[in-house]
Image: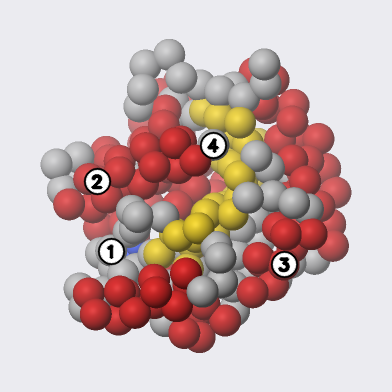
């Protein structure tokens, strides 16, 4: 059986797609015997830069991940090819959905959409939800950069509920540790494994797997 393909998609720029791809992929790859690939479909290539830093700091043999890049038109075939040889494939989608980039959603078993908990960010998520709906793909919204102000977040979750979209119970807080860990080709799971941030990532990774 092929592995599962998880597309991290959100047409709004800077929502946290690449941060979530790196953290989820590393969390999943930490389980012994599980093979994980990451696929960069974003022409900005940030995931590739992260992976190169990872090779540099950890050594090419120790990244614990397979990395590939593909343009939108090739993304579906590449994701499916990776899924033949890996248990999980995590796809980093570009912002500003183009037709070819949107086609990459066709390979997905699940679309994970990071969204910052503000009304503006949620409104900007609508095009992503529409693309996923057109392809009949299940979506899991994940709140990202959640500030330590629970009230706004609670209100947002209630609002999101009106749109009949699943919202993950787990979320990532607004923590500088996430940004810091990326620079060295790592994740908070590796730079601060005992932190609250690392706990958030492990909880989210487990929840996403349960939704597959
Ligand atoms: N939970 C978080 N806490 C703090 N900073 C975060 C968090 N998530 C993302 N960031 C920061 O927000 C910025 C955007 O994140 P990221 O690059 O992951 O978003 P993106 O959706 O991939 O962006 P793009 O649309 O350009 O591809 C980065 O500087 C990143 O370090
Ligand atoms: Mg990105």
Density class for disc 1 (Cα within 10 Å; few <14, some 14-19, many ≥20) is: some
Q: CA distance from mark 4 to mark 2?
A: 22 Å
Asked if disc 1 is less than 8 Å from ligand 1, the answer is yes
Viewer-side label of 4, 1 = 4
Question: Sequence-wise, which precedes: disc 4 or disc 3?
Answer: 3
Q: Quadrant of residue 206?
A: top left
Question: Sequence-wise, which precedes: disc 4 or disc 2?
Answer: 2
Q: Which mark is residue 198?
A: 2
Q: CA distance from mark 1 to mark 2?
A: 11 Å
Q: Which mark is residue 173?
A: 1
Q: Which mark is residue 212?
A: 4
Q: Is residue 117 visible?
A: no
Q: CA distance from mark 4 to mark 3?
A: 20 Å
Question: Sequence-wise, which precedes: disc 1 or disc 2?
Answer: 1
Residue at the spot 22% in from the left edge and 45% down from the top edge: 199
Question: Sequence-wise, which precedes: disc 1 or disc 3?
Answer: 3
Viewer-side label of 3, 2 = 3
Viewer-side label of 1, 3 = 3
Q: Quadrant of the N terminus?
A: top right
Q: Which mark is residue 130?
A: 3
Instruction: State the image coordinates of residue 202 (x, y, percent, origin top left).
Output: 30, 41
């Amino acid at each position: 059986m092929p592995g599962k393909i998880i597309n991290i998609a959100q047409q709004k720029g800077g929502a946290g797609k690449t941060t979530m791809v790196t953290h989820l992929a590393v969390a999943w790859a930490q389980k012994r015997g599980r093979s994980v690939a990451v696929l960069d479909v974003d022409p900005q290539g940030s995931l590739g830069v992260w992976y190169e830093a990872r090779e540099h700091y950890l050594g090419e043999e120790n990244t614990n991940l397979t990395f590939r890049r593909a343009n939108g038109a090739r993304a579906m075939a590449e994701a499916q090819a990776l899924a033949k040889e890996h248990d999980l494939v995590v796809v980093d989608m570009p912002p500003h959905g183009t037709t070819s980039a949107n086609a990459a959603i066709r390979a997905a078993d699940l679309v994970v959409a990071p969204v910052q908990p503000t009304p503006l960010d949620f409104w900007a998520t609508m095009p992503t939800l529409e693309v996923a709906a057109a392809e009949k793909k299940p979506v899991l919204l994940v709140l990202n950069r959640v500030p330590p102000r629970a009230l706004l977040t609670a209100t947002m979750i209630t609002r999101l509920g009106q749109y009949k979209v699943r919202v993950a119970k787990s979320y990532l807080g607004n923590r500088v540790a996430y940004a810091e860990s990326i620079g060295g080709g790592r994740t908070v799971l590796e730079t601060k494994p005992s932190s609250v941030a690392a706990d958030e990532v492990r909880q989210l990774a487990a929840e996403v797997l349960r939704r597959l």
